[in-house]
Amino acid sequence: MADGDDLDFNPFFQALQTTFKQQYSLARHKCHMVCVPATDTLQGRAINQRFVGFDEQAEVRILSEELAYNEDYKPYKILVIERPLDGITQAALVRLDRNITEFQNNYMIVTGYLDHAVQKLQGICQQATEDILKLCKRERQIDIIAQAVESYVVGSVHTKMWQAVCQQCKKEESLLQKKLEELRGVTGEQLGVKQAFCCPLPGAVVELATLDGLKTPLEKLSCLKRTLDSVNEEVNSHLRENQDPTSDDLPCLVSDDLILLLVPVLVQARCLHLPSNIFYIENLQWSLSSKDDLGFSLVTFQASMEYMMSADFSHLRATMSPTQKNNEISIPELMQAAQHMTLQPSPGERVGRGAGAEADPPGKMTSFDKRLESITRMMERSSQELAAAPMPLKSITGETGDQQRQGGSRGEQVPDVIPVRKADNSGLGDFLSSLQDDFGYSYGKQT
């Protein structure tokens, strides 16, 4: 037995020998099996009459076993188990489901009071987390439990909250819709991305197209991170394919380039609800760290969206040819690219057909096929939404672009990633030094 499970130092076993001596003596006399929770699961627990014994059946892992003898020299077993057997967790989950049902059926989200609904959900999550943590005090599990509770609660009320969030962000989405139409066909090179980094990004487009269909902030954050990972992978693959044989060094993709590269991805993925998704992520998760890769992914998308919303691209649109304006990756092309880059079949699912491989029954769809079909439907719906309302090609911010440079190879100048008023921060460095957001990250123009 490990030192941490030594019964002499186990608070529950000590309580059996003192406070609950009568119950322990009876169990020994009848040679009952005595279950003792592991010491590290008892931190912060009140060992009282309710804690001794259990009312419900449960399955637990046995960590160790000892053989002991009673006063009649008859043997009985003492089992050290991975957690207590009481029913606190079940009661907490029942109460959680009841609170969710009450919110769904009785709580009305009034326009302008979305913050109150967010606070209500946060209170439900905090109460459920506290109830569950009364049973488990392992430090490494606290964050995991809190995140699981939040995902369960927010995922359960997703439809109700998502409609309210989209309504609140309607104005921003209307502006974004105009920008997406204005930027159709614009390439990364026209936006100022270094020519070496300019390449198609179908894998990132397909990944980002799933964003609206996800229900929890954690799922949406993970989607943003996978999109950035896909951009990096596709750009690096492009760099390797076109690398100078005499050079071993590849150009480094910096944050400013990443922000600009996301613009064509957002346009082709038809992210009409990006403002709502960002609001949803920021306000409906409370336990995730803002300083990890997921937080960085959110900040990068915020920077790219702010750049799109605040800059004027009308001069780029005006100089584009009709062919370039419609130069987008088609949905079939995206699906084909995704099969090789992003949407790999789940473990255990056959990737290819060998000579002796058994064929799937006719008409049977794998989970991979279903996901491809789901993405296709989402992108088609976004296309319909984008085409539903006519919109002017001129930016609502007016004509502010610079004139085309004489003899230039990149065409019209585009707005800086950061406004002029931010230029005094340029001495601080790169992407992480200019525009501060709620997470403590910065983003801006490279110097």
Image (spheres, rainbow, N blue to C red):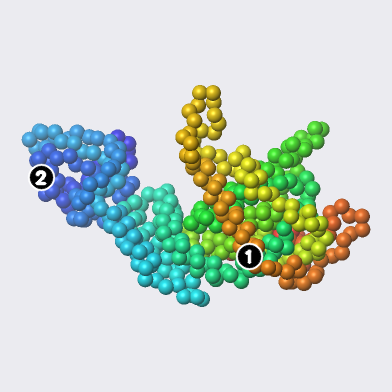
Tell me residue 41's x, y (percent): 32, 48
**Percent x, y of residue 407:** 92, 55
Tell me the element at label 2: helix
Q: Position of residue 262 (x, y in %)?
A: 68, 54
At label 1, the amino acid type is Ala
Pointer 2 residue? 26
Label 1 crowding class (10 Å Cα cut-off): few <14, some 14-19, many 20+? few
Report whether residue 85 is seen. yes
Q: What element carries label 1?
A: helix
- Position of 202 compared to 102: left or right? right
The answer to whether residue 423 is seen in the rendering is no
Image point (57%, 43%), residue name: 343
**Foreground pick, 276 / 182:** 182
Residue bearing mark 1: 388
Residue at 74%, 58% in the rendered image:
445
Q: Which amino acid does label 2 sit on?
A: Leu
Rendered view: 90 above or below 179:
above
The single residue placed furthest to the top in the displayed view is 356
Residue found 34% across the figure and 51% down from its top = 136
Q: Is residue 20 left or right of residue 304?
A: left
Q: Who comes first in sequence, dot 1 or dot 2?
A: 2
Identify whether 236 is placed above or below 126: above
Residue 200 image position (x, y, % from top left): 71, 46
